[in-house]
Amino acid sequence: MNESEQEWLKGAINGDDEAFTRLVETYQVPVYNLCYRMLGEPTAAEDAAQETFWRAFQNLRRYDTSRPFITWLLSIAAHYCIDQQRKHRLSILELDEFPDLDFADTNVPNPEKTVSNDQEDRLLHELINKLSGQDRAAVILKYWYDCSEEEISQMLSLTVSAVKSRLHRSRKLLAEMISTNNPQIVNERRTHESPAL
Amino acid sequence: MNHQPYEDMLLDERELSIKEKDSLTQHLLECPQCAKLEKSLRVLDHEFRSTPVVAPAPGFSERWKTSLPERRKQHERQQTRIILISMAVTAVATGITLAVFLFPPISPISIFANILSGLLILVNTVIDFWVFVGAFLQAAPKGLSIGLVLSVTTWISIILLAWGISMYKITLKGVKVEQ
């Protein structure tokens, strides 16, 4: 957090709305991206991101300044999205089958198989949509935000070992979904692959 | 074949020793199941790393700023509701506590009988009062009776109106709460 951000934070804690709006401008993208990845829908993500900033604004006095501000914001956003997802899941019937996914094999040079960003977005969402709220949050924080397992554990109020086991389980499930729906990728790769590690 | 240690090596994303790496590479050449898992994980990692960060629609902070007064109002209303409910709960709790202390342990039938007799006394008092008012109005000059009725009705209306407005303001507009 740079000096001006610290000034805005101080101002916001002292009730300066304009200062907090500047913090909103600064952190809108990471917060929105997390909400979008969690909820998979732009309108819901916008509402969740706005709600996150409102909750942060209301609880600014409780913010522990020894933690990075973005970590605190992402923690609020993740908890809110997990709650929203739980509510949403109660209202829909879970599908037992994996979705029909069609991933482009990115390592094999094959221009015809290139998919657009939008499609990749949708496919990735379908994939992570199969994870529970906390598993999804852990995966998103790990891969999009490069958070360490300790940071994720703080954000999601879990133990480090719980985070590790959630990531392990999620990766396994996601890999199984990919290989179940795209056996051709796995087979094709044999001829092009580089040594595993 | 024991896949578990190799599966853990692939899934845990921890730094492997040279010995572990060699052992895993060897295992992947021999075991199609783990090789399949490794390839799927590579596709997965690529998907995650290549999907871009999504930004909100332009004007996000403006929308935040615009929504702030409405959110504050909503928050104040919510606070008011909480205060009113707390007051009501406190009043009921106080009433129950007082009833427990003031009334000696008596049977529910006698409590019911007491309430019924209390209600009868109240109804009789109201009837007596009404008879008294009727007699007073008949005895008094006509102009005075009409004036009195009008005056009482006006005052009751004013009090009811003031009460209604206050309740409306409290429940709908809320009470200003310092942030």
Image (tube, rainbow, N blue to C red):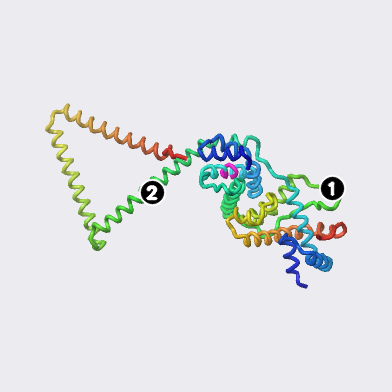
- Check if residue A105 falls in the magenta segment: no
Question: Looking at this view, is A14 or A78 the one in front?
Answer: A14
Q: Secondary structure at mark 2?
A: helix
Q: Does A44 sit left or right of B108 as displayed? A: right
Labels 1 and 2 within one chain: no
Name the residue that disc number 2 marks: B86
Q: How many marks?
A: 2
Label 1 sits on residue: A112
Q: Residues within 10 Å of mark 1 (few under 14, many from 20)?
A: few
CA gap between label 1 and label 2 equals 66 Å
Q: Secondary structure at mark 1?
A: helix
Q: Which residues are magenta?
A: A48-52
Image x and y of residue A143, in percent: 70, 52
Residue type, label 1: Glu
Choose top left, top right, bottom left or bottom right for residue A69: top right
Seen from the viewer's position, the closer of residues A104 and A106 is: A106
Query: Quick one: label 2, few (<14), some, or many (20+) residues within 10 Å?
Result: few
